[in-house]
Amino acid sequence: MADAKKRFTELFFKYLEIFGLIGLGMLLGWLLLGNPARASLGEVMYNKAVKEDNMDCQDCEDNYPLKLSFVCPITEVKFERVMNDEGQADDVFHWFFSKWGYEVPYCVDEVREVPGVIILRRHGES
């Protein structure tokens, strides 16, 4: 019984040390590199140089509503979010990147038909 207690104590402190080092690394990364949740969606970092990823174009603005589709990497549930204007698109992409990160593949498509819904007009139409 004494050997088991001693072994448990050794493992406990070993794992405590490991998790402490991981936590310290995360804290230092946060302090040195900044808060990842506050990263701008329009900025991409390449080798510590900020480059603008400007996606504003006339073709993009006139194609609303758009649909963001992706499959959750954990549950494999398919998500689809409809964006009716640029403000909603900013909100949806912020939600997507903050919840699932930048490594999850996604697709953005123009919404042509929505079952059970009649699209009265598209953005940019009179």
Image (cartoon, helix red, strand yellow):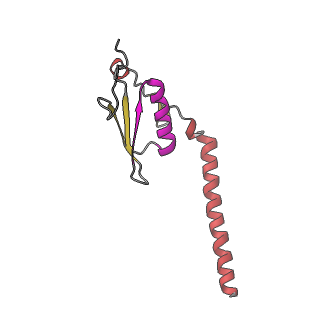
Q: Residue at x 63, y 47 (%)?
A: 28
Quarter of the picture containing the C terminus is top left
Q: Residue furthest bottom?
A: 1
Query: Is 103 above or below relative to 50?
Result: below
Q: Where in the figure is residue 58, as x and y percent of width and height?
A: 35, 17
- Specify start and end residues of the magenta stretch as a single range: 78-101
Between 71 and 98, the residue placed more toward the observer is 71
Query: Is 5 above or below relative to 16?
Result: below
Q: Residue at x 65, y 77 (%)?
A: 8
* Displayed quadrant of residue 104: top left
Q: Where in the figure is residue 87, as x and y percent of width and height?
A: 48, 25
Residue 112 in view of the camera: yes
Residue 92 belongs to the span the image colors magenta: yes
Between 61 and 3, the residue placed more toward the observer is 61
Q: Is residue 58 left or right of residue 31?
A: left
Q: Is residue 91 left or right of residue 111?
A: right
Residue 42 in view of the camera: no
Query: Is 87 above or below relative to 22?
Result: above
Q: Residue furthest front?
A: 116
Residue 83 belongs to the span the image colors magenta: yes
